[in-house]
Amino acid sequence: MPLRFLTSGESHGKALTGILEGIPSGLAVSADYIAIDLGRRQGGYGRGGRMKIETDKAEILSGVRFGKTIGSPIALFIRNKDWENWQEIMSSEFQSLNSKIKKVTNPRPGHADLAGAIKYDTHDIRNILERSSARETAMRVALGAIAKKFLAEFDIKIGSYVIQIGNQVSGVRYQVSGIGKNKDMKPKTYNLESIFETAEKSPVRCPDKKASQKMIALIDKAIKEGDSLGGIFEIFAANIPIGLGSHIQWDKRLDGKVAQALMSIQAIKGVEIGAGFEMSSKYGSEVMDEIFYSKKSAVSGQPSAGFFRKTNNAGGIEGGMTNGMPIIIRAAMKPIPTLRRPLQSVDINTKKTIKAAYERSDVCAVPAAGVVGEAMAALVIAEAFLEKFGGDSMSEVKRNYNSYLKYLSKF
């Protein structure tokens, strides 16, 4: 059964709901485990006032019994605590044409407001902004936490950290490239988990302490000026086996699926894997990851002995398939379009010039976006993992995976 998920719910509605189908039976899952990532998503310097109201916790409605999955769809429920203040505005009951509820008619530049209102034939933009809001990502993180728990059973670790906010760039990051270095250099151990752990101690989830301080100062400036900031975060998946994904069809390529998943996150405008755009300005001889062989793995984060690379410009994926190196993904987030100092817009009813609407929002959500990115990467990688090593129970999947590792060791 393929892994798939759906979410529903509005930003100020009663709740968010989600269904995850395809997780085998026998995986230990708890609401407390899911709450860890939900808490990480709500953190980060630059978040808005809503984070002071909500303390997200997912309730498991189905698919889990006595702390373990039973093979059926897993349904989660996250209550919106602010619902009590929005019951009339977001009521599902019929409202008369004489309703006193004010409509939102001034679309925000950079948001889904105008295109959505035209597409869905509505003259109240609230119908669009409530669902297009990044509040929906809370459920993605909850579902992604289950996917991460599944992958952790196979020692696959997924994490993220911020490498840029505004024009402030971290000097600490995973070095994918051997560009400009001696090709005969000794194999380097990339301690991704150490970078991740350091980043988790930072208010902006950046592993570079000096850069973190500069990022915080930049966010303070944006707060003062009623502006917003974007940035870049990096996601890694370590201990990935060779052969997830496929080159057979366009929609089976893992890098394509990863890119689509990351681009689906609100405000993400660019995704690159490995050295990405940097490779476009180099010669092929500079950026191809040369292949070596050793009876023992020469690079950490790689489960199979034998073939290895000294560089990882490809970011762990070649020809749509994992090559045994860590998967490295980078995503660029644009500044949040909801501004305290609104930009010019046009009223969709009167067609007159007006200031854009303001909804309570973050000033910078790059640290939180990294957590959402982890969830989406985990869901895509878990899907590819189950496609290759599928089974109806965890014990069956583990038998299949262990058999494959034996095969790799003899190849």
Image (cartoon, rainbow, N blue to C red):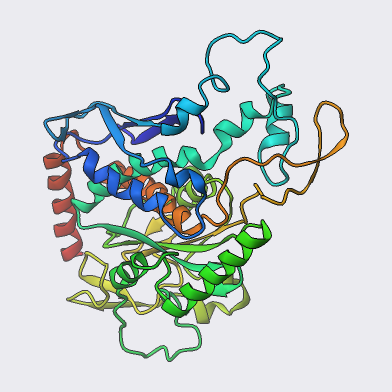
Q: Foreground residue, 311 or 84?
A: 84
Position of the C terminus by quadrant: bottom left
Q: Foreground residue, 406 or 203?
A: 203
Left or right, 136 with reference to 230: left
The image position of residue 273, as x and y in percent, is 48, 62
Left or right, 205 with reference to 121: left
Residue at horizontal 28 percent and vertical 43 percent from the top: 34
The image position of residue 61, as x and y in percent, is 27, 25
Q: Foreground residue, 12 or 27?
A: 12
Q: Is residue 363 visible?
A: yes
The image position of residue 72, as x and y in percent, is 24, 26
Q: Quadrant of residue 397?
A: top left
How many numbered dots are placed on residues in this image? 0
The image position of residue 45, as x and y in percent, is 47, 60
Q: Is residue 400 above or below residue 406?
A: above
Left or right, 24 with reference to 320: left
Q: Quadrant of residue 174?
A: bottom left
Position of the N terminus by quadrant: top left
Left or right, 398 with reference to 158: left
Q: Is residue 377 above or below residue 206?
A: above
Q: Is residue 208 above or below residue 65?
A: below
Residue at horizontal 14 percent and vertical 37 percent from the top: 26
Q: Foreground residue, 224 or 192?
A: 224
Q: Is residue 80 visible?
A: no
